[in-house]
Image (cartoon, rainbow, N blue to C red):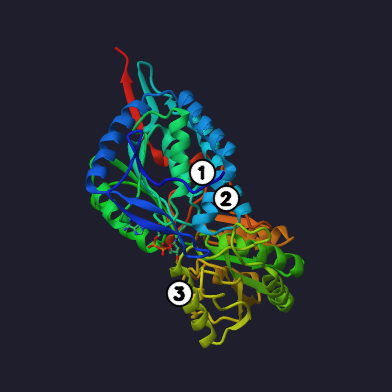
Amino acid sequence: MTQYPDLQLYIGGAWRKAAEGQPVLNPADESVIGMVPVARRSDLDAALAAAADGFRTWSRTSPAKRAEVMLRAARLMRERIEEIAYAITLEHGKPIAQARLEVIRGCEFFEWDAAEGQRTYGRVIPSEPGIKYIVMHQPIGMVAAFSPWNFPMSQPARKIGGALAAGCSIILKAAEETPAGAIHIARAFHEAGLPPGVLNLVFGVPSEISEYLIPQDQTRLIAFTGSTAVGKKLTEMAARHMKPVLMELGGHAPVIVCDDVDPVATAITSAIRKARNSGQVCTSPTRFYVQKPLYDTFCKTFAEKAQTVTVGNGLDAGTQMGPLANHRRIEALETLVADARDKGARVLAGGERLGNRGYFFPLTVLVDLPDDARAMREEPFGPLALINPVSSIDEAIEKANALPFGLAAYVFTHSARNADRLAEGIEAGNVSINTLEASVAETPFGGVKESGNGREGGAEGLAHYTIVKNVSHRIM
Ligand code: NAD
């Protein structure tokens, strides 16, 4: 029978209970489903000591052997897909079908990184006889990583995959609100034979853990996914200690709908994608800029589709959108919708919380928003679609680039000329044309401007987990 896992810290290859815990809630009914352990200073010290040992062992393990362990762990997670997906849905709320896809995606990250870790090639620079210049990539050291609650399994997978493939050890503080995905990853790696101390998993008070781990000598990289506000704080702290960061932060993705596409099909595709993970995705399509000839049909179709989306418990067959993951999102969305209404926006679908038990909020469609509506500037991180008309491609580019974010952007057009102009002109780390998929394991993912720096995935992803060393060797 599938059940929610026992939640413990994982340090030095052993499971460890904590004296204190805090409840984990099911967002569908607000019931307590488990107690997440709160690490104390002594637990963090144990994790640091273990990670130092782990680094010594793992950095000297051959890339092929590392890949073998990672692939074995990924295989175990694929075999346990039902159990992991059930736990994710219970703690996060997303429909179980989406939780299964998340597990597969997390495994793909491990599998890609395992293979890529065997290709961290250096180079030999041509030189005069008698001297050799050799550039090598070595694992950077211990990584302090922080993953968020929106993808309980695939977000930790990004960080653990990168670190382990490059030969680093890692202390991951996963999200306290959704701990089970990371627990399942640690369990799989334990059984796959990962040496003790290479992967250490903690939970607790986020600010206390980051403030303790970042300044430690042995911490060589800070990898964080979460809000821009927290990302800036951690980056400042890292800078004080001259540590590099890998920051995957907020977004506010524009979608440019050009006047040469089918507005009905595009609106339906967009509404379905907007509902994914209840919009709690940093790449979620959010600001729709639709060329005027298509505007009315696009808005009407989007709203009609939104009203058909079945919202409910993610474990129920037929649920297309689960609850929001926590009460903070409900409050944030209510505030953004009220502000937009006050400033003259029209609500074509949704707009109000559903019921008062569980954090349910419908797919909400707002149109004709002024640029100063808060929702147009602040990341809603929820099921809000904001639709406005534009007169030209130039205006669309200007609006798309008007915010300090630059993570994902989307374009719908059949015109190669439009596609090229938009792909070149939009300031974002990822531009997707005629698809609402922003990243897969083999492509580099990350932001520009306040959406962060560095890339996860793709051939670029592992670079952050390594240092470049040049060896000048005069041959005697
Ligand atoms: P938040 O900024 O308080 O927390 C986001 C994540 O950061 C959480 O997992 C939290 O545990 C962690 N965190 C918070 N303070 C920390 C600290 N001092 N040190 C280390 N980790 C810390 O916000 P929230 O209410 O949980 O989420 C809301 C916002 O976060 C959203 O509006 C969205 O912008 C952002 N977010 C982004 C992503 C993403 O994929 N980029 C994921 C989740 C949340």
Please state which amino acid type lies under the numbered disc 2.
Ser
Q: Nearer the viewer, residue 110 or 179?
A: 179
Residues under numbered marks 2 and 3 in contact, where contact means CB atoms less than 8 Å apart: no
- Give the image location of residue 288, x and y in percent: 61, 70
Per the model, the C-alpha gap separating discs 2 and 3 is 29 Å
Q: Nearer the viewer, residue 280 or 78?
A: 78
The answer to whether mark 3 is within 8 Å of ligand 1 is no
Residues under numbered marks 1 and 2 in contact, where contact means CB atoms less than 8 Å apart: yes
Residue at mark 1: 457
Q: Identify the residue shown where x is 50% and y is 80%.
A: 373
Mark 2 lies on a secondary structure that is: loop
Taking the image as shown, residue 397 lies to the left or right of residue 209, namely right
Please state which amino acid type lies under the numbered disc 3.
Glu
Residue at mark 3: 331
Which comes sooner in the sequence, label 1 or label 2?
2
Which comes sooner in the sequence, label 1 or label 3?
3
Q: In which quarter of the image is residue 430?
A: bottom right
- Give the image location of residue 202, x and y in percent: 34, 46
Q: Which quadrant: the C terminus? A: top left
The residue positioned farthest toward the top in the image shown = 476
Q: What number is the disc on residue 439?
A: 2
